Image (spheres, rainbow, N blue to C red):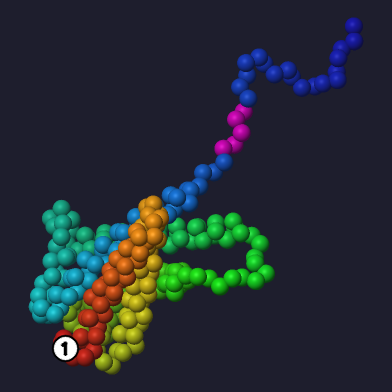
Amino acid sequence: MAVDTTSSKASKPAGAATPAPAAKKQRPSSVALKLIMAASGTLLVLFLFAHAAGNLKIFVGEADFDHYAHWLREIGVPLLPSGWFLWIQRFGMLLAIGLHIWAATVLTIRAKKARPVKYSHRPKIQGSYAARTMRWGGVIIALFVIYHILDLTTGHLNPVGGDTEPSARVIADFAPSHWYVTLFYVVAVVAVGFHLRHGIWSAVRTMGQQTSKGERRAKAIALALSVILVAMYLSVPFAVTLGLVG
């Protein structure tokens, strides 16, 4: 009797499971990315206002400002070693900034991929200056945070170093002879203001606000908060430069 050799494959046992197709790599949705931006942005805004309020204590007196700065280092003691709370806070803020930039970058890339064909004649963009400069504003802010830590926190870039009192570092930083430091500070803070103004409005829209009245209210609140924050931060370097402090 002839043996059938037309197929060398073994027959599949009955009931054998079929290998499942490889699962596609999950990626965060655009809604999730917008929520990450809104949450991280809210955390950063709260920190900025709290930090600005602390900075204003220098107008009460240098001793009060130094006492406030030393008190911040002792938060969490004895559960945490002295100064640890501030470093945990700083790394937390850097993480929030990183998440904010990452989410914004991914959303920007997705938006470009969704429109692969460029317009032969691109219409004029109708949007605020802040909306068109959000990307560069974020970069300026990130660089400023790093510089700010190396300058007024560790003292590596400060004219009097890090072994002096906090008020002395602030006064040395914004002295008239260091006008370029004050100028960089002004540029960074104004960038924060533009970023905050557009960011608050965008966050409100992400949360579902779509009415014309609500949009006008959100823009007004965003503008007011941005102006207040910028004024709070710039009041200190301007006061030092003009000789009102120090």
Q: Amino acid at mark 1?
A: Leu
Question: Front-most of 187 and 154?
Answer: 187
Q: Residue furthest right?
A: 2
Residue 49 in view in this figure: yes
Q: Quadrant of the C terminus?
A: bottom left
What is the x, y in percent for residue 50? 21, 66
Q: Quadrant of residue 223?
A: bottom left
> What residue is disc 1 on?
244
Q: Is residue 83 left or right of residue 114?
A: left
- Using the rendered view, name the quadrant where residue 48 is placed: bottom left
On the image, the x and y values in percent for residue 40 come to 35, 57
54 w.r.t. 82: above or below: below
Tell me the quarter of the image containing the N terminus.
top right
Determine which quarter of the picture holds residue 189. bottom left
Which residue is painted at 16% across and 65% down in the image? 72
Name the residue at the bottom extreme.
Answer: 177
Asked whether residue 160 is in view, the answer is no
62 vs 113: above or below: below
Asked if residue 80 is positioned above or below residue 70 in the image, the reply reads above
Residue 214 falls within the magenta-colored stretch? no
Neighbourhood count class around disc 1 (C-alpha, 10 Å): few under 14, some 14–19, many 20 upward: few
* Residue stretch in magenta: 19-23
Query: Residue at (20%, 63%) from the top-left corner?
Result: 83
Q: Residue at x 48, y 51 (%)?
A: 30
**How many numbered circles does the render carry?**
1
Q: Secondary structure at mark 1?
A: loop
Side of 26 where 87 appears, left or right: left
